Amino acid sequence: MEGLFTLENLFTLGMLVMLQAVLGFDNLLYIIIESQRVEKSQQSKLRKTGIWLAVLFRLVLLFALLKLLSYFTEPLFTLAWEGVVEGSFNLRAVVVLLGGVFIIYTAMKEIWHMLSLEDAMAEQKEKKSSFTTALVLIVTMNVVFSFDSILSAMALTDNFYVMAAAILIGAILMVWLADSIAAFLQKNRMYEVLGLFILFIVGIMLLSEGGHIAHLKFFGHEITQMSKATFYFVIVILVITEFVQSRYSKKLSKMKAAQKDLAE
């Protein structure tokens, strides 16, 4: 660990912490939504336990990627239906693609439940997920989210201790913010819909990333990875749209109430 606290390493640590915060947003959102499946008294514990267990697995994955990177990049299988579907899949591509499919499925299922009157009426009677089941899902999906942050970190430094410190600091920030964001979504349920659509876009982004890693082609057209800039631009537009629509709905409600009072 000699020379760990150099100016270069400290600067890199700061960059990595910001990277963890930015890339960890979608992960935190998934954790919050998944935690709502368990009993309310267990939700905070689930979020914190899930984050810390996920950090442990992330450190293990970081060590494994540093030592066994070639196993994650070597092709596992290929698709060679020329002119229809082509691609070469390694372990990372498979994990990212499966993660994207699962997140899209989760987001669409929750959106469907919100649109279903029968499900809404039976919401209180609906059987909750067990603490263990939800915890396993949170930790498993965190492994999927880990690839981007870890590989991006490896592009900045090869110092395991600097990367590990950034992951731990990022975890502390996530634990600190998780309950506050969950409470906000609980009090403002309309933003839960926004959160689910953001989660849906996260799934699309993972699918595009997995397809790009595998050089996947459909009918001669290669899948292009969605850039982080595009992802956050879409998120900003969604948030602005939700804000404007919310304000406009409140204004219309006040106008209708005023017109009703005048009519009476």
Image: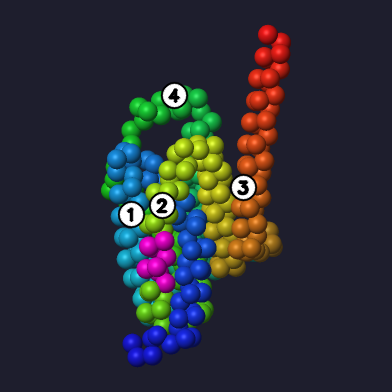
Structural distance between the alpha carbons of marks 2 and 3: 19 Å
Q: Earlier in the sequence, mark 1 or mark 2?
A: 1
Amino acid type of disc 1? Lys
Residue drawn at (35%, 64%) of the image: 55
Disc sitting over residue 239 in the figure = 3
Q: Look at the magenta stretch and give its main secondary structure.
A: helix
Residue drawn at (41%, 25%) of the image: 122
Disc sitting over residue 215 in the figure = none
Q: Earlier in the sequence, mark 2 or mark 3?
A: 2
In the image, residue 247 lies at what x, y percent? 65, 36
Disc sitting over residue 121 in the figure = 4
Amino acid type of disc 4? Met
User: Decide: marks 1, 2 in contact (CB < 8 A)?
Assistant: yes
Disc sitting over residue 48 in the figure = 1
Point out the stretch of residues depicted in magenta: 166-173
Q: Earlier in the sequence, mark 2 or mark 4?
A: 4
Residue nearest the observer in this picture, 74 or 59: 59
User: Decide: marks 2, 4 in contact (CB < 8 A)?
Assistant: no
Disc sitting over residue 178 in the figure = 2
In the image, residue 128 lies at what x, y percent? 33, 36
Q: Earlier in the sequence, mark 1 or mark 4?
A: 1
Q: Is residue 246 above or below residue 169?
A: above
Q: Earlier in the sequence, mark 3 or mark 1?
A: 1
Residue drawn at (70%, 24%) of the image: 255
Q: Is residue 84 visible?
A: no
Structural distance between the alpha carbons of marks 4 and 3: 28 Å
Left or right placement of residue 208 versus residue 97 in this view: right
Residue nearest the observer in this picture, 34 or 206: 34
